[in-house]
Image: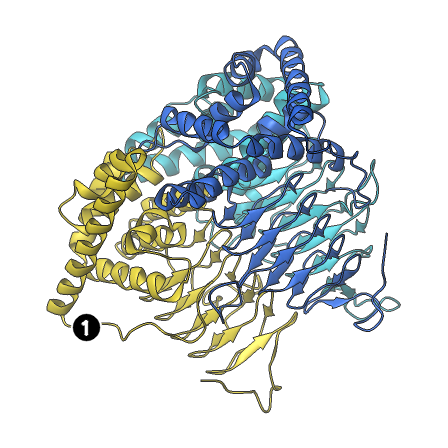
Chain colours: A yellow, B cyan, C blue
Amino acid sequence: MPGQDNQSPPSPTAGNVEENEDELLVWEQIKSEARQDAESEPALASYLYSTVLSHSSLARSLSFHLGNKLCSSTLLSTLLYDLFLNTFSSDPSILSAAVADLRAARYRDPACISFSHCLLNYKGFLAIQTHRLAHKLWLEDRKPLALSLQSRISDVFAVDIHPGARIGKGVLLDHATGVVIGETAVVGNNVSILHHVTLGGTGKVSGDRHPRLGDGVLIGAGATILGNVKIGEGAKIGAGSVVLIDVPPWTTAVGNPATLVGGKEKPKVHE
Amino acid sequence: MPGQDNQSPPSPTAGNVEENEDELLVWEQIKSEARQDAESEPALASYLYSTVLSHSSLARSLSFHLGNKLCSSTLLSTLLYDLFLNTFSSDPSILSAAVADLRAARYRDPACISFSHCLLNYKGFLAIQTHRLAHKLWLEDRKPLALSLQSRISDVFAVDIHPGARIGKGVLLDHATGVVIGETAVVGNNVSILHHVTLGGTGKVSGDRHPRLGDGVLIGAGATILGNVKIGEGAKIGAGSVVLIDVPPWTTAVGNPATLVGGKEKPKVHE
Amino acid sequence: MPGQDNQSPPSPTAGNVEENEDELLVWEQIKSEARQDAESEPALASYLYSTVLSHSSLARSLSFHLGNKLCSSTLLSTLLYDLFLNTFSSDPSILSAAVADLRAARYRDPACISFSHCLLNYKGFLAIQTHRLAHKLWLEDRKPLALSLQSRISDVFAVDIHPGARIGKGVLLDHATGVVIGETAVVGNNVSILHHVTLGGTGKVSGDRHPRLGDGVLIGAGATILGNVKIGEGAKIGAGSVVLIDVPPWTTAVGNPATLVGGKEKPKVHE
């Protein structure tokens, strides 16, 4: 469960050099953690070596890990590894978003004890990274491949994100089981989304039909947000809420159907 | 998210000849789509060839695909392939229901771009087809095998349908994660069920203890319907509702606990 | 769906001898069921032989089955088998809790037709047993391994139980998909938890931040219980409820947000 007070450190500024340095920093940290775990736990040594320690970069380790998780008897891990690695190479912003997500989990989830724990074990993290790769393929009009990846994420992680959805950086999908994000949904930066959350359509329209979440939004477990509604920056949605309305920035909506805490006219604004 | 206005074309009439023709039409379409995708996306060519293009019928392609998805180190894909193919052969209504489900997804879900997309990637579609095969085995008193298949569907697709449940044709399980359908539940034709929907018992009785859904019902994401209640033809259940009452035909129930829109005495009837 | 009237027979008293006898009784019953199923269903014979009949004890059969379910290309089934079998040997209470869970499913879930059905097919049962093994490793400070197992349970069964959580005996996770149980949660004996249930944090605190459930509690499908609240012995939580308050023993809470049936001052007490 993510903390609600946005305690994460300021993210690195957008310069490529700084992003590269940040990536190297996180990658060195991951290798150091994996080395320590491999020493203290022989049962994991081979796994940690093949998944982390034998790789020369975070992009390679992540491509290998995702390829292994998502492969099937008809979709080989080696094919996925090459595909993922090529896609990371073609657009460096995908990897820098992954690094921001690692930081989001590490600093916003009290149960996350290390970067390597998130990289190896958080299916929400792995689902988002695969989505970013699938989204890139979707934009390149490689739709059948993008939809195959969506299907594999749904089978393997029980997370269903349409490859058309646009998702920011520093996003935490906590626990992640059952999350559904529709084709025209937009998710801002530094958003936290708990398990069983739906960003869905109402079924009444086609076209732009899914929610838009501003930066820093927090969506509680089991919340269902439907239709082309706008959830403003820093807003919070209570667990189990059913949201069919816009929610202004820095306000909270709860209930089924959800209403604003403090009322529509005078919503209670929080920090 | 399925459209709510039942825009699907009239389903083919029940004659066997017409059903066969309809099946051949859909199968030709699927092969043509797969051929085009294999040409435009070499990364998928081998997968599409082995799963679709190498097969002589929809029943064979579907049996192969389900066998691959549901196999495990102790339940071989070849065994499942033979089992599924034999079961399709023994009861042609199972395949014609699959064809109706393909049409349901294609025409009721705006995110479904082709028949082959549904066949290959929609775990709700694959879960229902396996359920129909398991239901046939259940009725033949091959209960241990039927329950093994239920378990595999639950592991692989996170969809739990008791093999005793009776499910109509033209059914859409959209997104599908977390759907639970109990042993004595009945689902009519042309029903749309979103993810996280429960058709469950109240725990107070044994015997006939689960909901009965009429034709054309739409159940929103996360709705929980409990007990031996009747949801009438064309009724709609809002997302996140908890339904413990009968819902008359062509009316809508929403909320926790769910009430009829317009009230119990004067429920608002829709088209 | 579990019965709500706690019809299970009195559990065996705590003596080691009686627990051993009880384990042997259940194990003989499981083998007898598996033998009968293997004879009546040749398609399952090889699976039943390798998973049940070839083993000399329940601990071996369960270790083999869990190893097969949870293995991956980088975490071998043989490694998991040895790990699980050693952990069962080091703490006999883990196996006696498994036996109590088998009895809970058999007597509280009307859809459970035999012990072997639960052992082989109930992912909620398998998730809890793996959690108990992971919890033991967690207490031995083998945290990376415990967290790897948590991750595999979440991938394979869509059940996310933090290895730090403390869970009693005779517990039924029915259907199980989407269950999330946080690090500091406590679950008593003879508790029944339906699918999609969350025992989570509010995100406002670290430390002791998850619910505590007394003995005999029943949590309906989709209920979300958040924060360091206490759910008293024999209490019932309605499906889809969002619980942010303490619930006294033998009372019922329903709704979003949940309130006590009968009110806070005069909660209706049941048997």
Secondary structure under the numbered disc 1 in the rendered image? loop
Is residue B117 shown left or right of residue A93?
right
Report the number of discs: 1
Q: Where is residue C110 in the image (x, y as percent from the top left)?
A: 76, 34
**Is residue B115 visible to the viewer in this orientation of the structure?**
no
Q: Is residue A146 depicted above or below C106 in this figure?
A: below
Q: Nearer the viewer, residue B104 or C164?
A: C164
Chain assignment, label 1:
A
Q: Nearer the viewer, residue C10 or C61?
A: C10
Q: Nearer the viewer, residue C35 or C26?
A: C26
Q: Which of C53 and C248 is in front in this view?
A: C248
Q: Is residue C267 depicted above or below B104 in this figure?
A: below
Is residue B121 shown left or right of residue A136?
right
Q: Which amino acid does label 1 sit on?
A: Ala
Q: Residue at x 70, y 50 (%)?
A: B216
The quadrant holding residue B168 is top right
Q: Residues within 10 Å of mark 1 (few under 14, many from 20)?
A: few
Location of mark 1 (residue): A14
Q: Where is residue B107 in the image (x, y as percent from the top left)?
A: 54, 49
